[in-house]
Image: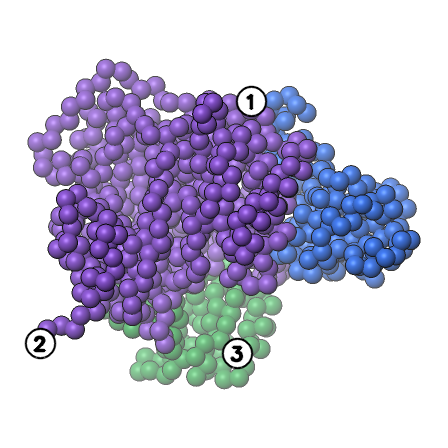
Amino acid sequence: MVETQLRFRDDEPAGDPAVTVDSFGEQTNASAVRIEPGDDARVLLPHLDRIRLVEVNFPVFGDGRGYSAARILREAGYAGELRAVGDVLIDQLAFLRRCGFDSFAPEHPLNAADAEAALARYPEVYSPTVDGRPAIWAKRHGLA
Amino acid sequence: MKILTGNDLKTGAVTWWTGEGWSLHVAEATDVGEHGDEIAARENAARRVVAPYVIDGENGPDGPRPAHIKDRIRALGPTVRLDLSVKPADPDAGSYVI
Amino acid sequence: MYKYDSYDQAMVDARVAEFRDQVRRRLDGSLAEEQFRPLRLMNGLYLQLHAYMLRVAVPYGTLNSAQMTMLGDIADKYDRGYGHFTTRQNIQYNWIKLEEAPDILADLAKVEMHAIQTSGNCIRNTTSDQYAGAIADEVVDPRPYAELIRQWSTFHPEFSFLPRKFKMAVIASDTDRAAMRLHDIGIQIVRNDAGELGAAFYVGGGMGRTPMIAPCINAFVPIDQMITYSEACLRVYNRHGRRDNKYKARIKILVHELGKDEYTRQVEAEFAHLLTQNIEPPLAELERIKAQFADPPFEIALDETVDRSDPDFAVWLDNNVQVHKAPGYAIVTISLKPVGGIPGDASADQIRLMARLAKRYSFDELRVTHAQNIVLPHVRKADLHAVWQQLDEAGLGTPNLDKIGDIIACPGLDYCSLANARSIPVAQKISERFAGREQEIGELKLKISGCINACGHHHAGHIGILGVDRKGVENYQLLLGGSEGADTSLGTITGPGFNEEGIVDAVEKATSVYLANRQDGERFLDTYRRIGMAPFKDAIYAKDAV
């Protein structure tokens, strides 16, 4: 199993291995699930209260479906760990964070200094997401 | 013959493998035979070239010449701005690509 | 015009720093080309046929003179003294060095410009009507809505790795001057019977190898839900657009395969959900942006008369000058299509001259048009002669707007690594062949692409030309009957292709059929639509009489 290199949570990581979305529905005791790009994240929504870890796989970094999957889960109130795994690169980290990912297990370890710089790069954001950062428009109009 | 070409990583200039290094002039290209991919991988890793690829070429009176028009235009420069091509002083340079 | 505040500036400055760091990592080997490629593309940096090419965004085609001057200076300082204005209202430089690209972005940032998302599988620069704010037929100035979309789409975290590129256009007139329905999303700002503003969404248009005219999926989205609705359109596409075949990855294929109704149903469901997420900027933000697009201080009681005694000037007036909404003013289009020239190219000196003219005569504003020309939107009629004289001296006074010489052409195989055939030499030969006959032929939009990706909009030309590679030899197909306006239609291929000389002759034959058949006031397109393809085909493929 690939090591989690970056984690932005204080709770204890879930110990269970992640199961596929298909088998998750049948395994009523599973608490960790792995989403592949073609999976529909919405099928997990009725079960959010028993999920502690969702891994979202990026087999190739250019397949951006996982970004939508992450936001859909967070928008539905999912508060457990959301981990990006696979072809996760430094220059994707900031966007992944904004879509709700709070841990990263890249296939190839990232240069720690470059990763930190990438995450701190943008002082502001134009679009609001589930990450709680106020959009620039909210700051402009005293809404944040 | 097989010719190896690519672009200089830093400047983007079109370059041709001479057997010892990279030239701006296709006439100085060498026949890489079966070794194109291997040289390309090595030079790419050394960051002396970007996006290298092997093309078919033919030997002409002035040396190697790419077989396809696209690579002949790469070798010369834009035919509509011959002043910016590798033969800025030759008004007939455009006929090279046909 | 929109002016950056400290937030906008900080975002662009951060982007420059980020790209400088990415270039450093590429040059020191920590980034491989396959990782770096999407990063440079999202900063508009391509590797083209001869060198790196940088595409600079001109949001909704609007520039001030300081920006235009900078574009000229960049051409001199970092390139070879010229730039190429594109069909997406942007400018491209053809001879960029990777090492210098971050410095160029830094120079652009000094004048509130950038190259963000001018390539890559993300939301590209939003285009608009080049006459926005100057033409009488608009409901409102569409640019504030485009600016709202610019900010929303910039660094959008969910939509930066879409199945394919994504192009949006915003207009606010029934007369479409931006080929709106040939975009991934075309938005028309409209007013309903109650007088409220809304956005009509046209989704799934495009050119390329499968040209499609976008259907309207929602005729009235309330204006304070436009961003949320856009987000819904994009999310459905990001999740379900095809990723197995890049030629089927554009949203037009998704809309086509699902069917307009099913796609719309999914968007509406997503929209209903996203409305609960409070992602829409408040109307106050739109008002803040709108205030910056307020009319310039037009003078009143200006003289309406223009001295037409100079015949060359009069021809230019009749061709390149449009009616302005304000009395005493006119809209000037500067043709970048001199006879035998390269469509869309301008030298650094010409770019700076246009900047000076804008500052002196057009309230400091210019526009780039999707037909690769430049507009001075607000010129006093009394100044038209002076403007024309200065343009003419600089080779910018060609009177051919929307005539056969006003050709749209992609860079083609002279510059582009995707091209199959050269476009520019064909444009030059046609332009030379018809020089002097343009007025007689009247409006005729001729568009040339050097490959099936259709950057030269050949599907939407009254006459379209598509360059293909036939066994290593350039070959050109002819299309007739396309249009990109309110009467959008796609051209039909006449038959077998031609070589370079042959395609020019074929265009000549097509125009002859038109001239022989036209009725009063008919444009080429009107005659074609009335009489159909057959007479054209007969003439074009007739065996020459012995």
In what element is the residue under mark 1? helix
At label 1, counting other C-alpha atoms closer than 10 Å, the crowd grade (few under 14, some 14-19, many 20 or more) is few
C114 and C405: which one is in front?
Answer: C405
Discs 3 and 1 carry the same chain letter: no
Camera-nearest label, 2 or 3: 2
| Mark 2 residue type | Val
| Mark 3 residue type | Gly
Q: Along the horizontal axis of the image, is A129 left or right of C471?
A: right
Residue occupied by mark 1: C284
Residue occupied by mark 2: C546
In what element is the residue under mark 2? loop
| Mark 1 residue type | Ala
Camera-nearest label, 1 or 2: 2
- How many numbered tags mark residues here? 3
Picture colour scheme? by chain
- Residue A108 to residue C107: above or below: below
Quadrant position of residue C544: bottom left
Determine which of the numbered discs, if any, sits on residue B36 in the image: 3
Distance from disc 2 to disc 3, alpha carbons, whole Å, reads: 54 Å
The tint of chain C in the picture is purple
- Residue A66 to residue A135: above or below: below
Chain depicted in green:
B
C154 and C192: which one is in front?
Answer: C192
The tint of chain A in the picture is blue
Determine which of the numbered discs, if any, sits on residue A23 in the image: none
Distance from disc 3 to disc 1, alpha carbons, whole Å, reads: 61 Å
- Regarding residue C99, the answer to whether it shows in the image is no
In what element is the residue under mark 3? helix
